[in-house]
């Protein structure tokens, strides 16, 4: 082929691919009209999937787990709260490979967290973790995850304490597991315990989604604690001046606060009409505020 | 044009002689058995099962023919040394490539049309009628045919410069990759390196997107397929085939056949 022929071929290929590129974008628009809007898990029977996977079940588990992460990530970034398929996907994954630890560790977190951060199904998270413990009794971290779900999402402090205590019996478990079990048994839910647990999740998590979630909880716990202290200062103000403060600056001017306090994202706290401290309406933390009790 | 037609017709005759169309018997048996069985064991989803099963069978058999025969189109002629006799005649190498492609495309069209007829017969047996909504099944069959043409073009491209076994592996690999194009684009930015994500998105637009031709779900549920999509997919397949065949013809023209 001559040089001209080569150039003509190259031009044809380049122009052809440019055409393919443009065409693909138009096809994508049309395909969206045809495709069903619902997510689908075609095979929900974990036993059937395992049988069909032959000896490649662990590989299938990896593929299913990747799908779990993609499914949760897409829903999370799209702020969608409908996570109905999370459990069927995790169910199939954990049956395909019962020793795939991230399925239990992260899957239980995805399931138990309240909407919109998670599926709001702590009962299924417990089921998943119990399945994990049955297959991997030596994994003390699963007891930690179980205690975490009981503590934060179910507020079942005796069961949380029992889970931490059971995990602490493992010689490889960290020392504070036993301390934590005792502390929860004695005090139930407390901000200090919640802070400790979330800080540990933040320090040990490798996944950015889990880390981000832990950070949000830590920021909210700090806001909760800050508001308590501001309220204490406001009570003192009322004792001294016979009325509740209306603005934060009044607390600063009276010397009860050193300066106008701000939340973890730098937004100043405000006082509500009844003189109670709360996060600034413009702060992103306001959106993330939990409705649940301590630590949530 | 006449020379390309002659090669195409001979390729078709050769496929018939090689009993390629015997797979139709197997398809007919599958459809008959499933039509009878489905009527007895499924409730309300007979049509969905028949359409899904029929389209899947058409697609799988077509793919097997496209890959295995597509790869052999060039290499067999070289191995048997029949190519030398052909090229000694007034036939250019690119005409040979185009003729071979057209011949297998014709074979696949006849094969697919026969299987589509079988599918409609089974559908009629189950539903006792054929409705307007069933045209979506015809569109799905047409899209399978477009997909198969693209697979044949890719198989021929690879067979022009490598061994048949590697050509089969490359074609199958590219076909599988082409089924995950949307997944490549949907990967979450927070989980992978942004530069790698951009690269994947670029690649996803250049890979042959076989997901474009997948309307099996819509056809099974009798959902209408937009006319614009039919036109765009036709142009897409034609353009992609033209690029691949142009490169294949260029490689084959440069190949030393001694």
Image: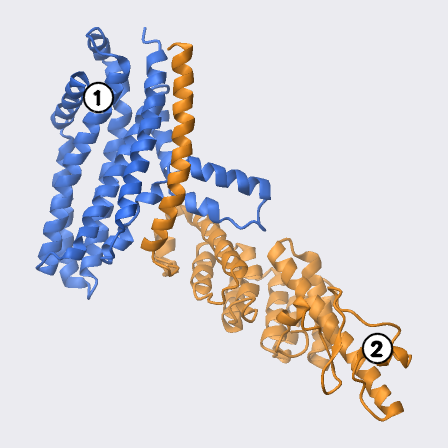
Judging by the rendered image, the residue that carries numbered circle 2 is: A249
Q: Quadrant of the C terminus of chain B?
A: top left
Judging by the rendered image, the residue that carries numbered circle 1 is: B99
| Mark 1 to mark 2 CA distance (whole Å) | 86 Å
Q: Residues within 10 Å of mark 2 (few under 14, many from 20)?
A: some
Q: Position of residue A286 (x, y in %)?
A: 65, 72
Residue found 51% across the figure and 71% down from its top: A121
Please indicate, yes or no, whether residue B219 appears anywhere in the rendered image: yes
SS for dot 2? helix
Q: Quadrant of the N terminus of chain B?
A: top left
Instruction: Chain letter for mark 1, please.
Output: B
Q: Farthest residue in the right direction?
A: A255
Q: Nearer the viewer, mark 1 or mark 2?
A: 2
Chain letter corresponding to the colour orange: A
Compared to B68, does A76 lie above or below?
Answer: below
Please indicate, yes or no, whether residue A169 appears anywhere in the rendered image: no
Q: Position of residue A247 (x, y in %)?
A: 79, 80
């Amino acid at each position: 082929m001559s040089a001209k022929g080569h150039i003509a071929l190259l031009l044809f290929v380049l122009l052809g691919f440019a055409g393919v590129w443009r065409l693909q974008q138009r096809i994508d628009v049309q395909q969206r009209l045809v495709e069903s809007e619902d997510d689908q898990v075609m095979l929900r029977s974990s036993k059937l999937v395992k049988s069909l996977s032959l000896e490649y079940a662990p590989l299938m588990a990896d593929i299913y787990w990747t799908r779990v992460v993609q499914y949760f990530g897409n829903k999370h970034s799209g702020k969608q709260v409908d996570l109905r398929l999370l459990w069927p996907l995790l169910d199939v994954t954990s049956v395909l490979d019962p020793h795939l630890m991230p399925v239990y560790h992260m899957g239980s977190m995805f399931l138990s967290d309240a909407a919109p951060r998670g599926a709001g199904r702590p009962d299924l998270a417990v089921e998943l973790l119990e399945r994990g413990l049955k297959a991997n009794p030596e994994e003390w971290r699963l007891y930690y995850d179980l205690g975490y779900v009981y503590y934060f999402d179910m507020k079942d402090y005796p069961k949380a304490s029992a889970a931490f205590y059971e995990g602490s019996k493992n010689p490889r478990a960290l020392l504070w597991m036993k301390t934590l079990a005792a502390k929860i048994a004695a005090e139930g839910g407390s901000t200090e315990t919640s802070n400790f647990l979330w800080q540990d999740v933040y320090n040990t998590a490798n996944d950015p989604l889990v880390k981000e979630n832990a950070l949000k909880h830590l920021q909210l716990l700090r806001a909760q604690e800050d508001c308590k202290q501001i309220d204490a200062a406001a009570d003192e103000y009322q004792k001294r001046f016979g009325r509740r403060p209306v603005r934060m600056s009044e607390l600063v001017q009276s010397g009860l606060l050193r300066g106008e306090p701000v939340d973890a994202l730098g937004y100043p706290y405000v006082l509500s009409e009844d003189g109670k401290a709360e996060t600034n309406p413009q702060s992103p933390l306001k959106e993330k505020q939990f409705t649940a009790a301590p630590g949530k | 044009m006449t020379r390309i037609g002659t090669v195409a017709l001979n390729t078709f005759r050769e496929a018939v002689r090689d009993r390629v169309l015997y797979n139709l018997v197997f398809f007919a048996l599958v459809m008959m058995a499933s039509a009878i069985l489905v009527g007895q064991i499924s409730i309300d989803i007979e049509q969905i099962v028949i359409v899904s099963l029929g389209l899947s069978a058409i697609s799988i058999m077509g793919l097997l023919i496209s890959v295995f025969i597509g790869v052999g189109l060039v290499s067999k002629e070289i191995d048997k040394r029949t190519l030398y006799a052909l090229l000694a005649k007034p036939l250019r190498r690119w005409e040979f490539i185009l003729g071979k492609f057209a011949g297998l495309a014709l074979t696949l069209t006849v094969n697919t049309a026969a299987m589509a007829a079988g599918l409609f017969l089974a559908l009629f047996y189950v539903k006792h009628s054929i409705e307007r909504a069933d045209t979506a099944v015809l569109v799905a069959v047409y899209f399978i045919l477009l997909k198969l043409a693209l697979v044949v073009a890719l198989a021929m491209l690879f067979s022009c410069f490598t061994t048949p076994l590697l050509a089969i592996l490359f074609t199958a690999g590219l076909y599988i990759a082409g089924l995950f194009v949307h997944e490549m684009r949907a990967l979450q930015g927070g989980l992978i390196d942004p530069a790698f994500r951009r690269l994947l998105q670029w690649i996803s637009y250049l890979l042959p997107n076989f997901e474009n031709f997948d309307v099996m779900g819509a056809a099974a549920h009798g959902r209408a397929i937009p006319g614009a999509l039919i036109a765009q997919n036709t142009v897409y397949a034609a353009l992609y085939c033209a690029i691949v065949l142009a490169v294949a013809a260029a490689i084959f023209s440069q190949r030393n056949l001694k």
